[in-house]
Image (cartoon, rainbow, N blue to C red):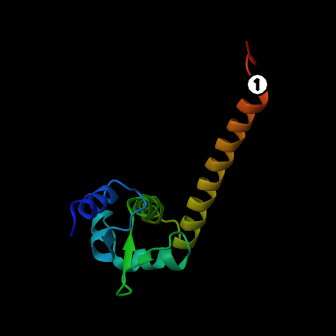
Amino acid sequence: MTAETRRTKIDRLDDDDYPAYTTGRAAEMINTTPAFLRAIGEARLITPLRSEGGHRRYSRYQLRIAARARDMVDQGTPIEAACRIVILEDQLEEALRINEELRRTTAGPGAGD
């Protein structure tokens, strides 16, 4: 392995989207079970990537989403509803971000002075 290859692999550890975690490790990190991770995958909240051997791999970004759903489930929300809520919250956040960006760009310089 070259020094460049090693550097590239190490750089991936800082990438929130890099699928670095196995199902067992991911479940342990967010204090849940592998079955929960599979269930939210089936509910299409997250889609883990697959290793060359076909094993699920999760990114830090996916684990943050899974933890949000797990918190809702822990409070009594059915898993399907928790997944839908997380999806809708993220869609709302994105729409608000786009809306704010459009306001800034259409207002132009000096607007609001």
Q: Residue at x 72, y 41 (%)?
A: 99
Q: Secondary structure at mark 1?
A: loop
Residue 9 percent location from the top left of the image: 29, 63
85 and 41: which is toward the camera: 41
Residue position for label 1: 108
Q: Residue furthest bottom?
A: 53
Residue 53 percent location from the top left of the image: 34, 87
Circle 1 Cα neighbour tier, 10 Å, few/some/many (<14 / 14–19 / ≥20): few
Horizontal side, residue 25 vs residue 60: left or right? left
Q: In the rendered image of this protein, does residue 60 appear above or below residue 51?
A: above
For the C terminus, give its image quadrant: top right
In the figure, residue 105 lies in which quadrant? top right
Looking at the rendered structure, the kind of residue marked 1 is Gly
Horizontal side, residue 77 vs residue 32: left or right? right
Residue 32 percent location from the top left of the image: 34, 69
Q: Residue at x 44, y 75 (%)?
A: 49
36 and 78: which is toward the camera: 36
Q: Residue at x 38, y 60 (%)?
A: 60
Horizontal side, residue 64 vs residue 31: left or right? right
In the figure, residue 15 lies in which quadrant? bottom left
Residue 110 percent location from the top left of the image: 74, 16
